[in-house]
């Protein structure tokens, strides 16, 4: 139970803020730590830019996704402060050598081992080296206590749970028709006469029709990324590929061993060949048992973390605005 003195101190703490500051700048308070709108905004910025690109033409969906992202970020910042408070409350100590190692590792990974590059980056972001070092300290603490709270020993997934999940989520494991595709790409040269690429593609097609292997011709003539592999694009699943729709439609009409006619676009011409076909099917349990186990482990871990954070909140002062 929180002491009267703690609650009274918290009331005085709030009294020090103006109404404008509470509304415009403060998102939450955890014990004596303030979480600001600026912290939230900086945390979601990279993800917000991705959302804008993805949902630019759907303003209502974009706003909903932004709100979900913001809510998640606020909760992560609150949970971070709860963990740091628990570390302090428990009387743990983090040796300075651990932080030194973390700083060196960060410099090696993200700044190519160049400390001067780190310093310039921090200056451009308005962050001091001391703040950066504190950031590394907190990262270690949060990671350590989270692992302690959700240890591997607490997460045991039985074969029965895996099999039950598999039976109840068949749609997740269903694959559409697939083909193993080879492709020859012949680009239209910039500034060349219209039809130049098509003329070369038809010459290549003629050689294939006469018996030269598709893979050999791809190695010689294709300008696609898979040229060295004989134009092998691997397995293509219907409805789940970034290929042009016209190419996909043409490819799935081919039988095993068949190749297409020349498929022409303004920028390039294409020849396709299907090497193998897999009809629509549900992936067998043996193939995805590990994936299901990982999914179930993540679900259990999330439940354990939520219970842990609920316990930490009960021992702390948390207020949202």
Image (cartoon, grey):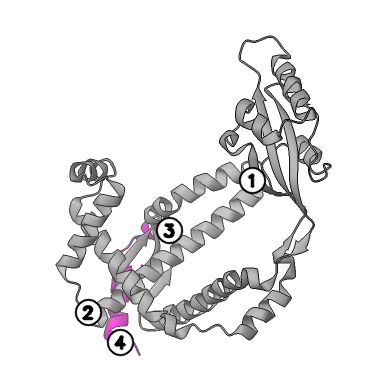
Task: Identify which residue, 277 or 174, lies in the foreground.
Answer: 277
Asked if residue 243 lies left or right of residue 15, the reply is: right
Count neighbours of disc 3 (C-alpha within 10 A) and say few if under 14, some if 14 to 19, many if 20 or more.
Answer: few
**Upstream in the sequence, badge 1 or badge 4?**
4
Q: Relative to 3, is 57 above or below?
A: above
Task: Identify which residue, 230 or 161, lies in the foreground.
Answer: 230
Q: Distance between the residues labelled 1 and 4?
A: 47 Å
Say which mark, if any, is on residue 59: 1
Q: Can residue 317 be seen in the rendering of this structure?
A: no
Task: Identify which residue, 120 or 127, lies in the foreground.
Answer: 120
Quarter of the image for the N terminus: give it.
bottom left
The residues colored magenta run 1-23
Q: Relative to 278, is 271 above or below?
A: above
Asked if residue 316 lies left or right of residue 286, the reply is: left
The residue under label 2 is 92
Which residue does the image show at 73% across and 45% down from the upper left? Answer: 275
The residue under label 4 is 4
Which residue does the image show at 15% across and 66% down from the upper left? Answer: 97
């Amino acid at each position: 139970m929180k002491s009267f003195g703690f609650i009274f101190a918290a009331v005085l703490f709030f009294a020090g803020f103006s109404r404008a500051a509470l509304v415009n700048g403060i998102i939450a308070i955890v014990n004596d730590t303030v979480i600001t709108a600026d912290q939230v905004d900086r945390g979601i910025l990279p993800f917000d830019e991705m959302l804008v690109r993805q949902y630019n033409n759907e303003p209502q969906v974009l706003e909903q996704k932004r709100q979900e992202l913001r809510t998640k970020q606020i909760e992560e910042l609150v949970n971070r402060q709860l963990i740091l408070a628990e570390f302090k409350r428990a009387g743990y100590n983090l040796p300075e050598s651990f932080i030194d190692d973390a700083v060196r590792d960060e410099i090696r990974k993200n700044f190519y081992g160049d400390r001067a590059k780190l310093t310039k980056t921090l200056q451009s972001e308005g962050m001091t080296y001391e703040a950066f070092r504190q950031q590394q300290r907190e990262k270690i603490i949060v990671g350590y206590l989270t692992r302690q709270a959700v240890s591997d020993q607490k997460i045991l997934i039985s074969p029965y749970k895996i099999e039950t999940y598999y039976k109840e989520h068949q749609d997740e494991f269903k694959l559409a028709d697939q083909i193993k595709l080879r492709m020859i790409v012949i680009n239209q040269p910039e500034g060349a006469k219209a039809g130049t690429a098509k003329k070369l593609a038809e010459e290549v097609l003629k050689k294939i029709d006469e018996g030269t292997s598709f893979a050999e011709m791809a190695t010689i003539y294709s300008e696609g990324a898979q040229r060295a592999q004989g134009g092998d694009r691997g397995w293509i699943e219907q409805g789940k590929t970034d290929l042009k729709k016209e190419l996909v439609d043409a490819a799935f009409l081919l039988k095993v061993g068949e190749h297409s006619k020349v498929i022409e676009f303004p920028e390039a011409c294409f020849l396709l060949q299907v090497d193998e076909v897999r009809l629509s099917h549900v992936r067998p349990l043996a193939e995805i048992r590990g994936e299901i186990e990982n999914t179930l482990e993540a679900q259990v871990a999330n439940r354990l973390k939520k219970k842990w954070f609920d316990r930490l909140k009960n021992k702390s002062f948390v207020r949202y605005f």
